[in-house]
Image (cartoon, coloured by chain):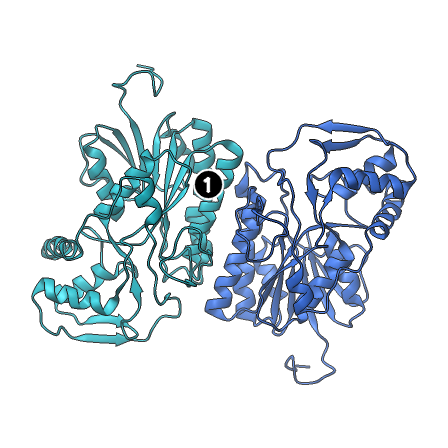
Chain colours: A blue, B cyan
Amino acid sequence: MSETATSRSTHVKSVLVLGGGGFIGASLRERLAHTGAAVAVVSRSAAVGLHANETWSTLDIRDTAAVARLLRPGQDVYHLVSDSNPSSSNWDVEVDIRDVVLPTTALIKAAVTAGVRKIVYVSSGGTVYGVPRSVPLNETAATDPISGYGVGKLSVEKYLAVFGQLHGLNYQIARVANPFGPRQRPNRGQGVVATLMYQALTGAPFQIWGDGSVARDFVAVDDVAAALVAMCDYEGPHRIMNVGSGQARSIASVARDIETVLGLEAHPVLRRESRGFDVPVNYLDIGRITSETPWRPRTEWMDGLAATAEWMRQAIRQGDV
Amino acid sequence: MSETATSRSTHVKSVLVLGGGGFIGASLRERLAHTGAAVAVVSRSAAVGLHANETWSTLDIRDTAAVARLLRPGQDVYHLVSDSNPSSSNWDVEVDIRDVVLPTTALIKAAVTAGVRKIVYVSSGGTVYGVPRSVPLNETAATDPISGYGVGKLSVEKYLAVFGQLHGLNYQIARVANPFGPRQRPNRGQGVVATLMYQALTGAPFQIWGDGSVARDFVAVDDVAAALVAMCDYEGPHRIMNVGSGQARSIASVARDIETVLGLEAHPVLRRESRGFDVPVNYLDIGRITSETPWRPRTEWMDGLAATAEWMRQAIRQGDV
């Protein structure tokens, strides 16, 4: 069998998901499982929840030769790898450069050489803009990150653009707000919803930085997965799209809504000193993606919290989190 | 002797020049030699033209521990290192990340730890902006580089900003246009003036990409050195300043002006295919630096060309270029 990617309409679409073992990766793979695509998953962790259409490679993207061998002409490549997090990347920024930025440039070159169809890159709407001059942030806003994590994301965006310009790479950049939902692990310095939910379910006090007025754009992980697929299908001129709910919710209000979902009353709060690297208010203008693609955020906030609670309860019961 | 940096007005100012063996470095060091500062020079090349106030360390900034040992509290640090050039950084972008961006993040951390007074970083007004939406470019213009070189420069700018925000690092970013003048070596893919001058002086035809209409902002290297010193002294709010002549000159007009300076008539031209990574017209708005500091571009264009010709003639005679 040596058909080219477009020779027959029955040709099976080839997809590569880098970082497919993570939180967003799991939702994306669930969605791709219904499309009939042949999906190669790359993850640092061992195979879990493998779908029938999937093959799994346990490897780090720093093994650039191994990743390159998985690339195919005409393939869709989703890049979901980030291994540092905003709270750890504010001093040892070189870790992110070495472990993510450098291997990603190798991937980009290999993708050009292999002739992949498109790279969909998950960037960070919560960090690449830095302190907003005004909200909601649209894609043309200034990009002045206040974390090494944000600079790493922005650098990769810029390298994608260079290879697009000079080598014809087809790519799409999703600036994703704060995703939440089932499978998000608490206590990792990211994932406010997961962390607060875990605290509520385990009887620990809510730990809230500052007065809880810091506000973020929380977007359901299922909606993020759908947005990535929509962006992969998109053929228009815009390379960068915000992916969010388009609304700001304060941490304090999230805590209150979690109380409501769980039927708790006045769950105790432990206030911690506010963190210097927190942007006060950040939410995304999602006008571009909603006008350029059929995508809309479809998950109702309280439904998303309820689904998160359900997953987290089971994960706690099974000792998974 | 163990005085703190500010304990006495007679205290000798400590300066570190990274990349001091290069083209801009040599001009900067000449200027610093007149200030009485104690200057530590770091260069990959062996000591050359050492001034009385200087010590020289031949080392690569990738030797981050050795560089860190040269840092002092209260020191002014000029960072002039770039080891790739725009024409070689459009595929193997990882070289620039590994050799410049990563070591620079180590330097930044070490500078914070050592308590240096300020880092003056030489960025690239010719590449960080990419294709201008309008000219002249001011410092708030979009930064969409079309070369890996430009992305590397922009990444370092952003890391400086992160460490400024989170760790109080004092820094200044000079987005330098196309410097020209004595000591610029021809035929390195940068330095159009030097390359055309060399061609004219050696009887080779001018090699001009495309129709010669590509226009750049050429700034005399002495003016660049003066701008860096002015920015080091500057105490105001602006972290980023363009450093250029504020004028655009086409490559074709530069060739004509070189003919005039050398008294040549109709020097032959060899046209080469235009390069995809050339921005058509780029010149910088220098309103910010001229209003915020006493600096002005002082070198007359034709005088700068004449000085370049004089240096180049001698360098050719001595077999140095």
Tell which of A239 and A314 is nearer to you.
A239
Q: Is residue A21 visible?
A: no
| Chain designation of label 1 | B
Residue at figure coordinates x 35%, y 67% from the top left: B280
Residue at figure coordinates x 71%, y 57% from the top left: A20
Residue B284's x, y, as percent?
Answer: 34, 55
Q: Which residue is mark 1?
A: B160
Tell which of B16 and B44 is nearer to you.
B16
Residue B260's x, y, as percent?
Answer: 11, 65
The image quarter in which residue B264 lies = bottom left
Residue at figure coordinates x 45%, y 46% from the top left: B156
Residue A183's x, y, as percent?
Answer: 80, 49
The image quarter in which residue A224 lies = bottom right
Tell which of A320 and A174 is nearer to you.
A174
Q: Residue furthest right?
A: A263
Q: Is residue A281 left or right of residue A321?
A: left
Residue B140 lies, with reference to residue A234, above or below; the image says above
Image quarter in which the N terminus of chain B is found: top left
Residue A232 lies, with reference to residue A315, above or below; the image says below
Mark 1 crowd level (few <14, some 14–19, many ≥20, 10 Å Cα): many
Q: Is residue B200 visible?
A: yes
Q: Amino acid at mark 1?
A: Leu
Residue at figure coordinates x 48%, y 67% from the top left: A165
Residue A58's x, y, as percent?
Answer: 70, 55
